[in-house]
């Protein structure tokens, strides 16, 4: 059966051909082992990290767009019809829902597989694969994922589902919401990023910006003033803050047609953009929840099932089981008293694993890809290194934020295990070549175009999409 295409899918950039060229070099280090390649790659990324984000300008690489498709269609039912929701939105929503905070070890990547159910080939089962930067999932995620599966895999929506699940989500993502709220508080009150009190200049910028917004839309101004007053308090109700931000984002979406009036008539454009960005960030958790609610409703109507797989958890669980096995023949307490200490060490000594997108890529370089949609979603844009590695694969992805992280490759032992994986090894060598070339271009004075805002892949999407259709609370079926 030919690959099936998702009508509602985005048009992400196509990955470049994965017929990779080997780096051309005369130095012993570059011609040597994967270990030598990783050492030089880490050094090049450290230089790029120090200078500026390294996003190639659009003219330097020619991309063509294509739709998301399955690697090998495994679904006999026409379950893509009537979804009225983008695959990229579903993947982003689940990545945010399972990402407790916005950066660092909690960044999450997602991939979706669609297959037919074993007992009824007219119905689908959707398997959501998740990976995290941390490399493993704490035990609490098992119960968390079961709650989301249970919401879908039932004959009807449970009573009290909207309010109960919403509270469950806001409690789980408390750190993420707090980070966004603190960013927004400093932004609307005119407090510099690393300071604790507003400055006269920034406070004046905020006042001028709110005056401009009031002239543009009195309704939006009123909502933002309410949000500002809440952020000025010593303590916040996180769920209330997120809901108010979502309400403001809806109003922005409804008035997006008139946004040009604000662009041409604002005294402090940078401050205005920052305030609107903070509103969008603070509303992200609500948006992710509503996307899930819409997806859940569709799956219930179609009789489809949802399965969530947390990839990478087996390391901790298997290693802990090995600890018990190794001391099973110990009769006394001499060794047993160190069990907890040993298990904690296993949990904390993994080094720096590859970012979640690459963990996903490596998993599907070995696993069966039948029925898998060729798009990797993420709660954060991919970095410079991840973007280049994904380009060498069969997967599509969102734009990179362009920042290089040299620490990414310092834990070399986490990458040497890919010595036998030809695809990943070739991609790493090609990345080293590109990183070194970028360093040389920068030395010659060539300025590279760059993106910022790695945490805001959806910034100002309210200008181009109707968010009002999402704002329908799930009902009991």
Image: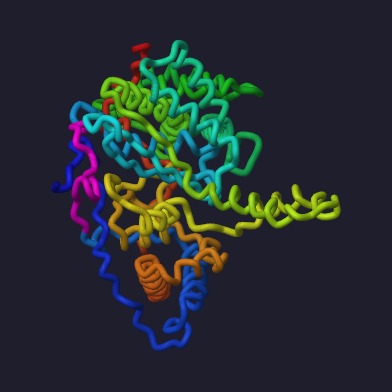
User: x and y percent of residue 110 in the render?
Assistant: 40, 43
Confirm whether residue 438 shows in the render.
Answer: no
At 18% from the left edge and 30% from the top edge, which residue is drawn?
Answer: 81
Q: Position of residue 362 (x, y in %)?
A: 41, 58
Quadrant of image for the C terminus: top left
- Res 8 quadrant in image: top left
Q: How is the image coloured?
A: rainbow
Of 78 and 260, which appears nearest the observer?
A: 78
Who's the residue at 41% across and 72% down the image?
432
Q: Is residue 32 above or below residue 417?
A: below
Residues in magenta?
A: 63-80
Q: Which residue is at the front of the view, 114 or 167? A: 114
Mostly what secondary structure, the magenta segment?
A: loop
- Locate residue 289, reporting x and y percent: 42, 26
For residue 378, say whether it is visible.
yes
- Give yes or no for residue 79 being in the magenta stretch: yes
Instruction: Identify which residue is drawn at 85% across, 52% down.
Output: 332
The residue positioned 48% from the left and 83% from the top of the image is: 29
Q: Quick check: 273 above or below 299?
A: below
Name the one closer to the observer, 183 or 322: 322
Q: Position of residue 257 (x, y in %)?
A: 24, 26
Q: Is residue 266 above or below residue 19?
A: above
| 192 is higher (above) or lower (below) than 404 | above
- How many circles with numbers are drawn on the protein? 0
Answer left or right for 106 relative to 76: right
Residue 275 within the segment the image draws in magenta: no
Question: Depth check: 100 or 274 in front?
Answer: 100
């Amino acid at each position: 059966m030919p690959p099936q295409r998702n009508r509602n899918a985005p048009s992400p950039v196509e990955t470049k051909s994965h017929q990779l060229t080997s780096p051309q070099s005369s130095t012993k280090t570059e011609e040597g082992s994967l270990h030598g390649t990783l050492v030089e790659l880490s050094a090049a990324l450290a230089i790029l990290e120090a200078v500026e984000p390294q996003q190639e300008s659009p003219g330097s690489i020619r991309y063509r767009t294509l739709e998301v498709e399955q690697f090998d269609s495994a679904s006999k039912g026409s379950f893509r019809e009537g979804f009225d929701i983008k695959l990229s939105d579903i993947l982003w929503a689940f990545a945010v829902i399972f990402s407790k905070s916005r950066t660092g070890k909690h960044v999450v990547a997602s991939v979706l597989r669609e297959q037919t159910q074993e007992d009824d080939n007219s119905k689908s089962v959707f398997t959501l694969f998740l990976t995290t930067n941390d490399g493993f999932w704490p035990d609490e995620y098992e119960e968390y994922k079961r709650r989301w599966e249970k919401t879908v895999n039932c004959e009807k929506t449970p009573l009290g589902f909207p309010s109960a699940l919403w509270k469950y989500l806001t409690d789980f993502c408390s750190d993420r919401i707090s980070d966004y709220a603190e960013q927004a508080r400093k932004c609307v009150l005119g407090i510099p990023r690393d300071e604790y009190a507003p400055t006269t200049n920034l406070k004046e910028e905020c006042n001028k910006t709110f005056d401009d917004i009031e002239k543009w839309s009195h309704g939006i101004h009123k909502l933002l003033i309410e949000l500002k007053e809440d952020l000025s308090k010593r303590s916040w109700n996180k769920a209330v803050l997120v809901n108010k931000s979502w309400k403001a984002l809806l109003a922005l979406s409804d008035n997006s047609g008139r946004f040009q009036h604000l662009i041409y008539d604002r005294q402090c454009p940078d401050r205005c953009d920052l305030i609107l960005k903070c509103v969008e960030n603070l509303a992200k958790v609500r948006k992710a929840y509503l996307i899930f609610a819409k997806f859940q409703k569709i799956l219930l109507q179609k009789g489809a099932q949802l399965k969530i797989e947390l990839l990478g958890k087996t390391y901790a669980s298997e290693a802990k089981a090995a600890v018990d096995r190794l001391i099973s023949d110990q009769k006394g307490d001499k060794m047993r008293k160190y069990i907890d200490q040993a298990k904690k060490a296993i949990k904390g000594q993994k080094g720096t694993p590859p970012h979640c997108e690459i963990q996903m890529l490596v998993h599907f370089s070995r696993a069966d890809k039948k029925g898998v949609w060729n798009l990797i979603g993420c709660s954060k844009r991919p970095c410079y290194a991840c973007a280049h590695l994904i380009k060498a694969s069969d997967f599509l992805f969102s734009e990179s934020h362009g920042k290089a992280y040299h620490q990414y490759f310092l834990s070399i032992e986490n990458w040497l295990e890919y010595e036998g994986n030809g695809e990943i090894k070739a991609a790493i060598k090609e990345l080293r070549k590109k990183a070194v070339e970028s360093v040389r271009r920068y030395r010659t004075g060539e300025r590279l175009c760059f993106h910022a805002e790695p945490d805001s892949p959806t910034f100002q999407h309210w200008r181009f999409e109707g968010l009002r259709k999402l704002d329908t609370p799930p009902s009991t079926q």
